[in-house]
Amino acid sequence: MTTDDYDEYQRGRDKMTAHRKTPDALRSARWFAPDDLRSSGHRSRIMQMGYSPDEWMGKPLIAIINTWSDINPCHAHFKQRVEDVKRGILQAGGFPVELPAISLSESSVKPTTMLYRNLLAIEAEELIRSHPIDGAVLMGGCDKTTPGLLMGATSAGVPAIYVPAGPMLRGNYKGTVLGSGSDGWKYWDERRAGNISKAEWIGIEGGIARSHGTCMTMGTASTMTAIAETIGMTLPGASSIPAADANHIRMCSESGRRIVEMVWEDLTPARIQTHRAFENAIAVAMAMGCSTNAIIHVISMARRAGHDIGLDDFDRMSRHVPVIANIRPSGDKYLMEDFFYAGGLPSLMGRIRDKLHLDTLTVTGRTLGENIAGAEVYNDDVIRTRDNALYQEGALAVLRGNIAPDGCVIKPSACEKRFFKHTGPALVFDDYPSMKAAVEDEDLDVTADHVLILRNAGPQGGPGMPEWGMLPIPKKLVKQGVRDMLRMSDARMSGTSYGACILHVAPEAYIGGPFALVQTGDLITVDIDRRSIHLEVSDEELERRRAAWQPPPPRYSRGYGWMFSRHIRQANDGCDFDFLQTDFGEAAGEPSIY
Ligand code: FES
């Protein structure tokens, strides 16, 4: 720690001591303390549930925002874990109340959970705001639940701690280790090529997800929970613990104990989630070989916290931080369970400590540097040394050009190197069903050099920007042994996906971005080293096409989708609603009428 780091840390400590709350300063005291009729009603109704005043009066009231549901296998253990969190809260002298929130099961929700991330953020924020809540434990993990819960808690502004669901155990089929998502894509292509039978496929279905917990590849869930830990919102090491491990139970009760103290210390998200904390998150994401979805979520989370983080921050960091986590799909062998046994996230952070701001504050009340002090790596093949990195530059690259003036994203660490510089003819699809049907047509006019394009799949066009970006390799090419080709879309892709997929094209085609003007047969040139992507069509011709372009009809005429369509921002701005960002209208905070 430098002298400057130490001074900033000490200032944070002094502030924490100075801010220590008294019971009458609790937010919940506004509901329960006054000697008036309305407060009497609040007290009476708590007692109606069988709680005597000794159990809650003058104690921090802690919301446990739980995204458990019967249809989310990644959170199936939350029904038990919430009891462990409650135990911790009670031990520390708090009063727990469980508040259920939308579950956002990645494997069930159509057209995509991304359509509802902001709905969860609104729900979490308003659950906290409208109830007598002094602090919150956020229980999530399945992809969008992490950013959704954190965005909501950030805007609500009360102390909050994140409890990640933890990755599931490694998959297994006949002794072969299986990785979530990645092996689904891989073996599906083998089935399409006629290399495996239906019976074998059913065996894979049964073996690839064999415990509760989130996807155990470095998909979006593991990426985002690692980011939550890096920005300081979880206990140290929490994001790496497998869901089925007893350490996970202990982490839950400890989180419950800690949130009560955080309330007394007034340790709010604003004090933890600084600009430097988000820079740390980007560095760690790169070292992890993160999901491309991290870009959208980190931008939206940072902007909720009032920090101007954008695509350039990712690209800058990607040039300096190597991928050292040998976890699929960037890695070729290991899964999150192996990562935990190798030391987990604190050990990885220890390996890139010179790339991190070690003075950032965390939910422990200590700095990130203090949290990771002494962390050791127990397996150098899982968490590589920097001179033996998987990939010397970071996991993601941001490309710009006439076809994507506001940027698009590729994951070079998960694609074949021959696509780092490539020119090929476009094969364009305007919607998902026509693309899906065409790739199964063995007479499709396509070669391995083509650039497959799917558009109208962005935030408004999808709608909700579904994970369609890993377009299937046409069956004709699969049978020829082709397993990767250049693909491009304004959609996202699952963090468990891989291949030469250019994603998040902005502005999206549906709102008239230049991506809407590409025609089958146009040449597209990609140069990852130069961070460029170019449609080889003259400006005059593009102007002619622009004049002829007709906007598609609206996706929605009512309901949540209607509101979504009017307020969703583009991928490079994090896909938050315009009216939820801190720079839009009034700053986050409670209206004084309550
Ligand atoms: Fe829940 Fe992958 S389906 S984390």
Image (cartoon, helix red, strand yellow):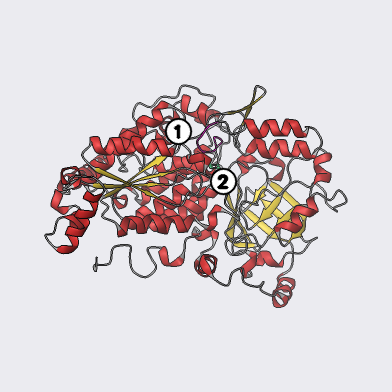
Which residue is at the far left? 35
- Give left or right: position of 231 versus 211: left
The residue under the point 25% across, 39% down is: 6
Rendered-image quadrant of the N terminus: top left
Which residue is the extreme one toward the right?
A: 443
Q: Determine the secondary structure under disc 1.
A: helix
Residue type at mark 1 is Ser
> Looking at the image, can residue 455 be seen?
yes
- Position of the C terminus by quadrant: bottom left
**Separation of residues labelled 1 and 2 (CA atoms):** 22 Å
Predominant SS of the magenta segment? loop
Q: Which one is in front, 106 or 371? A: 106
User: Could you tell whether 59 is left or right of 347 in the image?
Assistant: left
Label pair 1/2, CB-CB below 8 angstroms = no
Query: Does 102 lie within the magenta span?
Result: no
| Amino acid type indicated by mark 2 | Leu
- Which residue is at 51% across, 28% downward? 337
Displayed quadrant of residue 306: bottom left
Which callout, 1 or 2, points to the residue nearer the camera?
1
The x, y position of residue 191, in whole percent, is: 77, 37
- Helix or strand or loop: what does disc 2 sit on? loop
> Horizontal and vertical percent for residue 144?
49, 49
Residue 240 - label: 1
Query: Can residue 369 be seen in the rendering of this structure?
Result: no
Which percent across, then down, holds residue 265? 21, 45
Q: Which residue is mark 2?
A: 396
Looking at mark 1, is its residue's CB closer than 8 Å to ligand 1? no
Span highlighted in magenta in the image: 211-217
Front-lying residue, 153 or 223: 153
Find residue 504 and name its label: none
**149 horizontally vs 215: left or right:** left
